[in-house]
Amino acid sequence: MQNKGSAGVDGMKVTELFSYLESNRDNIAISILNHTYVPKPIKGVEIPKSNGKTRLLGVPTVVDRWLQQAVSQVLMTKYELTFEEHSYGFRPEKNIHKAVTQALKSINDGHQDIVDIDLKGFPESSGLTIRFYFN
């Protein structure tokens, strides 16, 4: 199934974003600068998994996705260089296929330990940095 850019709670389609921004860009910018911008609620959509179960997916509005992408691009340029070489989660030019390829290479090079960590629910305020080094 291909991502078609589903509408969020406001019903706006991706194809409507440009014209919406032409009319509302100044108001959005002012609310961001004044720290009064409030993202819209997230629309919950259940999507099927290969095992027959479903997974809840949160769909932000198109405007909120656009703003998230803008923030992501700015933060990525600042923090990308601090990530470990073999960190593959949500990074440019990194994906599950490259992670598996690296894992197989590590196994073939004689390494015995591979760590996959999902930090969902990990306390965001802990400030803890986790690094694993294997020889």
Image (spheres, grey):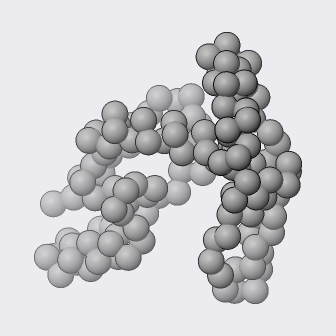
> Which of the pair 36/116 is nearer the observer?
36
The location of residue 134, given as percent across then percent down, is 21, 58
- Identify the residue at image location x=43%, y=57%: 89
Which quadrant of the view contains residue 93? bottom left
Which quadrant of the view contains residue 51? bottom right
Q: Taking the image as drawn, is residue 115 in sight?
A: no
> Which of the pair 79/85 is nearer the observer?
79
Can you say which quadrant of the picture contains the N terminus?
Answer: bottom right
Q: In this view, does 128 lie above or below 102?
A: above
Q: In this view, does 10 lie above or below 51?
A: above
- Identify the residue at image location x=76%, y=73%: 47
The location of residue 128, given as percent across then percent down, is 44, 33
Q: Taking the image as drawn, is residue 56 in sight?
A: yes
The outermost residue toward the top is: 34
- Identify the residue at image location x=82%, y=42%: 41
The location of residue 107, given as percent across then percent down, is 23, 78
* Residue 76 located left or right of residue 12: left
The mark tally for this picture is 0
The location of residue 108, given as percent across then percent down, is 18, 81
Can you say which quadrant of the picture contains the C terminus?
Answer: bottom left
* Residue 113 located left or right of residue 97: left
> Which of the pair 99/57 is nearer the observer?
57
Which quadrant of the view contains residue 101? bottom left
- Identify the residue at image location x=82%, y=58%: 44
